[in-house]
Amino acid sequence: MEEPLMWQIATIKAMRAETPTVKTFTLALPRWTPHRPGQHYDVRLSAPDGYQAQRSYSVASEPERSGEIDLTVERLEDGEVSTYIHDVLTPGDQIEVRGPIGGYFVWEASQGGPLLLIGGGSGVVPLMAMIRHRAASGSHIPTRLLYSSRTPEDVIYGEELARLNAAHDGLEVFHTFTRAQPPGWTGYARRIDGQMLAEVIRPFGHAPYVYICGPTLLVEAVADELVQIRIPPAQIRTERFGPTGGTS
Ligand SMILES: Cc1cc2nc3c(=O)[nH]c(=O)nc-3n(C[C@H](O)[C@H](O)[C@H](O)COP(=O)(O)OP(=O)(O)OC[C@H]3O[C@@H](n4cnc5c(N)ncnc54)[C@H](O)[C@@H]3O)c2cc1C
């Protein structure tokens, strides 16, 4: 248990833009250990004067990929750490990380399903680790992702999700666009609400394991609605990407 929590120096191996404000960074880890999908790493930045800032970032990749992890980071305009990660780091650079961390917001194929994943914005990141793990382990567990984005341009992992959805192996992806929709869009075009949840959850009855991740308000609203439609609270797990204030 001690070992994974030691700080280590990761090397940025690759970087790609997901959306205009979101990038994925592949980190090579000298002391890689397999994570459980849903877990996160802490990233620590240190200035020459000793000032340090630390934030959490979920692992986006599946544990079947050894030696490296993907972190997907949204750039917040006035953010201290996310702007540095976006604007300064390039492949070959090194960064201090520790992990994998967290034992509650995790799902592995061995746990079974059905599985309902609900994400808002960058909250899709740990859910994507679960989806990628499901695919990599050859699981066909019935899984639905309900993913809320402001506009189609803000969808993270859009092509990969479309491809996985088209494979018809038990994964279905539902998008809702709250501010702008693609031309001819006939799907959801509003914030996640009780009616939407009832529709998406219907084939699973009251049985699914539910994972909700995103901004605090979305997570709380969705969890409340699910309890109202009588999903047992013990089956609902939440992760809030609110401000961490983790400076030291
Ligand atoms: C367990 C966990 C996992 C996380 N995983 C990810 C991830 O995979 N990808 C990712 O991009 N972020 C993730 N986050 C959020 C991340 O840790 C930081 O909070 C975020 O990057 C902002 O840090 P910052 O230093 O740039 O902004 P700060 O300087 O801390 O904050 C700047 C401003 O933005 C506001 N703010 C802070 N965080 C958020 C937020 N998440 N959304 C909206 N406004 C915010 C603050 O109130 C403040 O006004 C995760 C958080 C937790 C707790």
Image: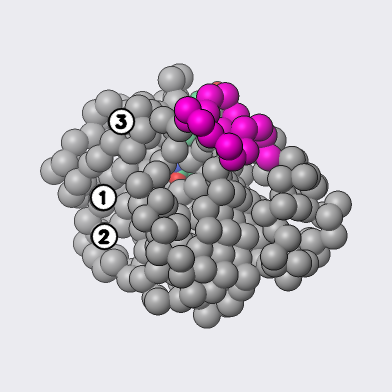
Residue at left offset 28%, top offset 44%: 25
Q: Which amino acid, mark 2?
A: Glu
Magenta: predominant secondary structure element? loop
Query: Which residue lies most toward the left here?
Result: 92
- Residue 237 position, x and y percent, is 66, 58
The answer as to whether callout 1 falls within 8 Å of ligand 1 is no
Is the residue marked by circle 1 packed among few (<14), some (14-19), or many (20+) residues within 10 Å? many
- Residue 51 position, x and y percent, is 37, 30
46 with respect to 220 (left or right)? left
Query: Callout 2: helix, strand or loop?
Result: strand
The answer as to whether callout 2 falls within 8 Å of ligand 1 is no
The CA distance from mark 1 to mark 3 is: 13 Å
- Which residue carries the number 2 mark? 68
Residue at left offset 47%, top offset 28%: 183
Query: Callout 1: helix, strand or loop?
Result: strand
- Which residue carries the number 1 mark? 26
Q: First in sequence: mark 1 or mark 3? A: 1
- 151 falls in the magenta region: no
Nearer to me, 155 or 46? 155
Is residue 173 shown above or below 90? below
The CA distance from mark 3 to mark 2 is: 19 Å
Confirm or deny contact between disc 3 and disc 2 (CB under 8 A): no
- Which residue carries the number 3 mark? 86
Nearer to me, 112 or 61? 112
171 with respect to 242 (left or right)? left
Q: Is residue 39 visible?
A: no
**Span of residues in magenta:** 177-192
Is the residue marked by circle 3 packed among few (<14), some (14-19), or many (20+) residues within 10 Å? many
Residue at left offset 56%, top offset 54%: 145
Is residue 185 shown above or below 103? above
Q: Which amino acid, mark 3?
A: His
